[in-house]
Image (cartoon, grey):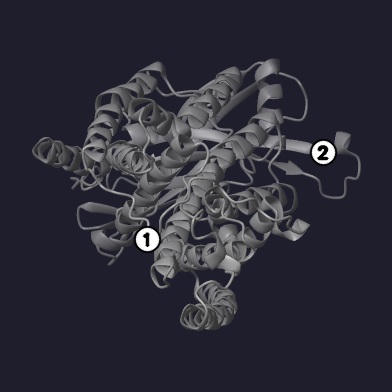
Amino acid sequence: MEKKLVPCLVVSILIFCSVTHVRSDASDHRYKVGEDVPLYVNKVGPFHNPSETYRYFDLPFCSSGPTKDKKEALGEVLNGDRLVTAPYKLDFLNDKDSEIACRKRLTKEQVAQFREVVSKDYYFQMYYDDLPIWGFLGKVDKERKNDPSEYKYYLFKHLHFTIFYNKDRVIEITAQSDLNNVVDLTEDKEVDVEFMYSVKWKETEIPFEKRMEKYSQSSSLPHHLEIHWFSIINSCVTVLLLTGFLATILMRVLKNDFVKYAHDEESAEDQEETGWKYIHGDVFRYPKYKSLLAAAVGSGTQLFTLTIFIFVLALVGVFYPYNRGALFTALVVIYALTAGIAGYTAASFFCQLEGTNWVRNLLLTGALFCGPLFLTFCFLNTVAITYSATAALPFGTIVVIFLIWALVTTPLLVLGGIAGKNSKAEFQAPVRTTKYPREIPQLPWYRKTLPQMAMAGFLPFSAIYIELYYIFASVWGHRIYTIYSILFIVFIILLIVTAFITVALTYFQLAAEDHEWWWRSFLCGGSTGLFIYGYCLYYYYARSDMSGFMQTSFFFGYMACVCYGFFLMLGSIGFRASLFFVRHIYRSIKCE
């Protein structure tokens, strides 16, 4: 089995490298004077609704000639990019002054359409030699007007492009709308529009290799970066101090337990056992729904591996700003390639728990995360199709993703499951399990599952909630996130705190003579995902200006999938830590 997995892994790595670096040489072009440098219009949409974007020519813009779609990579399509040739011609080193791009007579309906999008703060996005350009479509004049019916609506019709070059390469581009050269859209009447543009070329000393640093620096200005670091360090120190305090208490209590139990063994062997030693015959009794637990641990382990790979790529610089779709491509490819890890982990653990129907367990593992994600995608893609938004995936892209799932994910999942079934690993319980389970004593309300989950999720969440704002502002806004080193540190702290708090609660559960710790440890470890979803509610209503059914459904739908993934990943971390801890303490004492 291992010999079969090696060539699959090699091929998978080659596929991954080719896909994730599909854009590495896309903008590495050298141009001659007068050569046509490609300018593409991408999408338009309301500024406060990042998921609600439409094709540029869905609005009644004119074109200087027949338009041509640009071929997009998988990640770019998932990102909602739909690039089309622009009506503006920006030849290399050719200055232009008030050049007419195209003319169009707008009907009353088209004027009303433009007026509506201007009122909603629509922006446009273009790409010039793979450099992003943004701008607003128009403006609303509200000065000295209290009644909305008195507002004036204007469409910008003149763009000023300023392009910086270094020898034969494009380094930077900016686009500014002429605020005085506008079309009045206030009244429903036909209007003749001349869309114009100007081009100014300027030389710069910035090398080609550093042309993307402008976007990184805009997201990490010195004072912002200093505040960011300070807030993260403050949060982490607070959490680590609390964790250290609890760890010290737990270690002292455990030490006293070991001394007490050793003394009891020497003084009176027939003395009645109390506390967690009392339930040594039940603590390794296999849990209910062990197939589901094994599948959850397998899926969580796969997502943890996926996260580590993403961090490695981020730290080595693959996800530089506006490397369009690289993150989505990496997520799809790496998730497909790590399916074998889920299959191996789930099948191996399920067989250790003396499970028999490993094929059903493998099917459950494959569907546990992909199933809810697929159902969510079907609903949201239908919504996007209804809105004619670029978030709606073309049929060809859906076929490609299905083929990746059918030809890569499923075979690797099966191979991993077969390897896990044949691993012959034993569960390694340090004490024997009795034939009949002991009755669990009546416990106070705060020792029930839900209060314990609330306690377990709060401390890890408090370590990451500051960083969550920056991530949300990047994913669901227009900020650029580039400081992956901070994010990686926060992630490591999240894992440490999650593992420890789950272990601590498992100890307190066992000390109360409650031996059903298996599912409790998984649920307590994953409860941080529920807190993150609670933060989603706060962010949407208190920190963002998002609105509309489509944006709301996309935000809460996909964030539900992300938080569910966190639940599985952190749940498997908490369970693994608790399993290690329980084995350790029962191995350290003598049980009859």
Please state which of residues 81 and 573 is positioned toward the viewer in this rendering: 573
The mark that comes first in sequence, 2 or 1, is 2
Query: Can residue 174 be spotted in the picture?
Result: yes
Residue position for label 1: 430
Q: Which mark identifies residue 549? A: none
Q: Quadrant of residue 211?
A: bottom left
Residue 226, relative to residue 494: is it above or below? Answer: below
| Residue found 15% across the figure and 36% down from its top | 8
Q: Quadrant of residue 386?
A: top right
Please state which of residues 299 and 183 is positioned toward the viewer in this rendering: 299
Helix, strand or loop for disc 1: loop
Q: How crowded is mark 2: few (under 14 residues within 10 Å), some or many (20 or more)?
A: some
- Residues at marks 2 and 1, CA–CA distance in whole angstroms: 77 Å
Q: In which quarter of the image is residue 424?
A: top left
Helix, strand or loop for disc 2: loop
Please state which of residues 504 and 474 is positioned toward the viewer in this rendering: 504
Residue 124, relative to residue 269: is it above or below? Answer: above
The label nearer to you, 2 versus 1, is 1
Left or right of 589 in this view: 313: left
The amino acid sitting under disc 1 is Pro
| Residue found 67% across the figure and 51% down from its top | 449
